[in-house]
Amino acid sequence: MSFTRRGLILAAPTLFAIRPVWAATAPTPRAAEGPFYPVKIPTDHDNDLVRIDGLVREAGGEILQLRGVVADTDAKPIADAVVEIWQCDANGVYRHPGDPRPSLRDRAFQGFGRTVSDKEGRFSFRTIVPVPYPGRAPHIHAKIIAEGRAPLTTQFYRADYRDNARDFLFNRMNSDERQRVSIDIRPLSGNDRAQWETDIVAILPDIG
């Protein structure tokens, strides 16, 4: 199965649908990995960042159901891609020894997750709505690796955050690039705890 060049739509619309991609054949803009990629991958690194094995309570913050698809520059889904995300907790602190405010860290937030895309290129995470911290707009880091493709490291930003333009990395991109890494966060009804949802599309570049 391949997707049209006008956009990528998940093959199972009853589960969820990815919003159209403005330039489906253009690779997702790259971004620096940053200083807070885990020094050591935590034992619990599944796709639920809100709950850590062995802890009763869940992480603070607003729950975000993040769903996405990985595709190539021909708009075809990529199966078995390794997808990683990492972000700060609701207090703006990373689960990393280099973060300068360790006393404020939410010990119940996993901070890093990893999953693999299915045969339709789909993946999902349960995390929290990203928040700002000094010097940075709210964002979620992502790294995607697929066999036979150049790896992609990027950052996704909240489209509704009014001060994105003050973020030095966001400012390095042109308007089209900014749009392709901006995510719409929508309320998700029917849950006891306030939750939100978003969709992302990651277009991996060809090698060479």
Image: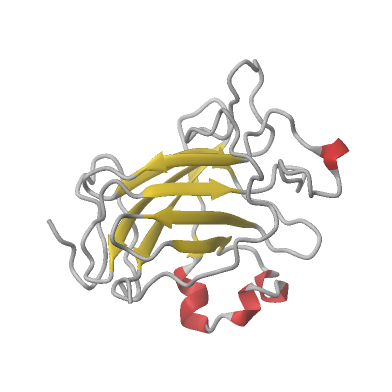
Q: Quadrant of residue 112?
A: top right
> The C terminus appears in which quarter of the rendering?
bottom left
Q: Is residue 64 left or right of residue 76?
A: right
Q: Position of residue 159 (x, y in %)?
A: 55, 64
> The N terminus appears in which quarter of the rendering?
bottom left
Residue drawn at x 49%, y 55% is 143
Residue drawn at x 21%, y 72% is 5
Residue drawn at x 68%, y 52% is 36
Q: Quadrant of residue 160?
A: bottom right
Q: How is the image coloured?
A: secondary structure
Q: Is residue 32 left or right of residue 182?
A: right
Q: In this rendering, does residue 166 appear at all?
A: yes
**Extreme left residue here?**
1
Q: Position of residue 148 (x, y in %)?
A: 28, 61
Residue drawn at x 24%, y 40% is 14
Q: Nearer the viewer, residue 82 or 65?
A: 82
Q: Position of residue 15 (x, y in %)?
A: 28, 40
Q: Is residue 126 left or right of residue 7?
A: right
